[in-house]
Image: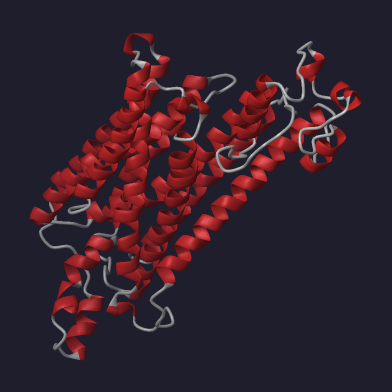
């Protein structure tokens, strides 16, 4: 059986590394006197609509700094408001699973999971990608990006490829550990040949040399329906999508090992999702803290809904992670990362509120790069690990028709909610 303890420790180290990366990005924002896309919209609006102003006025807009009418008490209070709202969304599914008194019905958790899928996809396409494009193609950036308007798409593509490569390498490492632990060939093609996989025709000697699932006394024939079904389930565990690929043969891992691999993959995809959300949350926090007046109040309300929906989406995924031990503690720590990351961005914004230059080339480029990379991470996670995977599992296919329809509706509603919020935040 696959041993997850070592893998869990590695993922713990990876999660710590992600936190350090987020802190480094925060320092980069301070150094660059950064602000989010809304700052650009606020200070650079005249650059978009007034094409006849002279070069001096344009330079003045690109170098303007300082926050007017900044209310100390209201901005500091907003930190605790965002902390409470984000924490409520992130911890609600976690507490519902681990605290018996707050137990949430399984159907509600399922619908919350699919609601979160729509939230994540909509966040990437409506909140992050347009902001990244607006910043990197801002006139104040000038020719510093090579006068190439396709940089946002390039960065999104780079993030997607990087996430796919990282997930493949880590999943492959887990499969390799399992193969060595059970004395199986690491190369699946080699194993298939050893088992007489071919087109489903194998000898009795190949069947005799199969996995512990057969050694345990399960009598499986090469053409039996049960064998094919279990083979499909095990192939799902190693990311072979059976609804895209026709798979023959006998299972090469036991059901317990398959569950362990699925849990490992789910944990990894959740951490990748959290990375993308946290990068964007830092930007949101800075945006809110440097806003003033009526815009600040409107943005605060919109971001409260934004953080609650994102927290609910992430918390639903965290609550489903199967830890070997200290499950509640580790789930609580993962939720805490999201809960505190936006207030951290707000603290950074408060620190630079008088010196930031929202339309400076450095601020626009740094915000555009972060937004584009975050969009790529969430697009990959939302489409590959959430939409395609969750709707394609055997568990989902066995749902009642009414529940299936409810899951689709929940996904669409989540996307619609974030699309509406995107008008303000």
Q: Would you say residue 306 is visible in this rendering?
A: yes
Q: Is residue 340 left or right of residue 12?
A: left
Q: Would you say residue 339 is visible in this rendering?
A: no
Q: Nearer the viewer, residue 131 or 326?
A: 131
Of the 4 image quadrants, the one containing the N terminus is: top right
| Residue at position x 67%, y 37% in the image | 247
Could you tell me how many numbered marks the image carries? 0
Furthest-right residue in view?
Answer: 205
| Residue at position x 85%, y 29% in the image | 183
Splitting the image into 4 quarters, where does residue 66 fall? bottom left
Location of residue 28 in the rendering, given as x and y in whole percent from the top left corner: 43, 61
Splitting the image into 4 quarters, where does residue 412 fall? top left
Q: How is the image coloured?
A: secondary structure
Q: Nearer the viewer, residue 261 or 100?
A: 261
Say above or below: 14 vs 60.
above
Q: Nearer the viewer, residue 316 or 56?
A: 316
Location of residue 324 in the rendering, given as x and y in whole percent from the top left corner: 59, 20
Location of residue 357 in the rendering, given as x and y in whole percent from the top left corner: 27, 69
Say above or below: 54 vs 419.
below
Q: Is residue 22 left or right of residue 54?
A: right
């Amino acid at each position: 059986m696959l041993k997850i303890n070592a893998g869990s420790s590695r993922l713990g180290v990876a999660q710590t590394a992600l936190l350090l990366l987020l802190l480094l990005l925060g320092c980069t924002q301070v150094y660059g006197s950064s602000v989010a896309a809304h700052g650009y919209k606020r200070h650079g609006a005249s650059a978009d609509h007034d094409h006849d102003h002279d070069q001096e006025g344009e330079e003045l807009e690109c170098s303007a700094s300082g926050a007017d009418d900044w209310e100390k008490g209201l901005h500091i209070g907003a930190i605790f408001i965002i902390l409470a709202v984000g924490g409520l969304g992130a911890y609600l599914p976690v507490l519902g699973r681990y605290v018996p008194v707050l137990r949430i019905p399984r159907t509600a958790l399922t619908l919350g999971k699919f609601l979160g899928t729509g939230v994540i996809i909509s966040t990437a396409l409506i909140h992050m990608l347009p902001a990244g494009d607006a910043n990197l193609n801002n006139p104040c950036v000038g020719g510093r990006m090579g006068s190439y308007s396709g940089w946002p798409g390039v960065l999104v593509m780079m993030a997607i490829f990087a996430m796919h490569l990282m997930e493949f390498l880590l999943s492959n490492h887990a499969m390799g550990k399992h193969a060595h632990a059970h004395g199986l060939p690491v190369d699946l093609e080699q194993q298939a040949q050893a088992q007489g996989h071919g087109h489903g025709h194998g000898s009795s000697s190949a069947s005799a040399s199969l996995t512990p699932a057969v050694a345990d006394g399960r009598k499986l024939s090469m053409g039996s329906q049960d064998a094919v079904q279990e083979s499909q389930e095990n192939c799902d565990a190693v990311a072979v999508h059976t609804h895209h690929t026709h798979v023959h043969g006998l299972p090469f891992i036991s059901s317990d090992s398959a569950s362990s691999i699925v849990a490992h993959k789910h944990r990894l995809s959740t951490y990748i999702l959290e990375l993308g959300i946290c990068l964007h949350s830092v930007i949101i926090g800075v945006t809110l803290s440097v806003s003033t007046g009526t815009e600040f109040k409107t943005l605060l309300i919109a971001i409260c809904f934004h953080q609650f929906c994102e927290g609910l989406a992430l918390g639903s995924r965290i609550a489903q992670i199967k830890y070997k031990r200290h499950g509640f503690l580790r789930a609580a720590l993962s939720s805490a990362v999201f809960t505190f990351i936006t207030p951290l961005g707000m603290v950074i914004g408060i620190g630079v509120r008088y010196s930031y230059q929202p339309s400076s080339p450095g601020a626009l480029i740094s915000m555009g790069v972060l937004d584009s990379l975050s969009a790529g991470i969430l697009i990959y996670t939302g489409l590959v690990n959430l939409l395609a995977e969750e709707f394609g599992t055997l568990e989902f296919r066995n749902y009642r028709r009414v529940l299936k329809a409810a899951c689709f509706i929940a996904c669409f509603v989540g996307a619609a909610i974030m699309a509406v919020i995107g008008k303000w935040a």
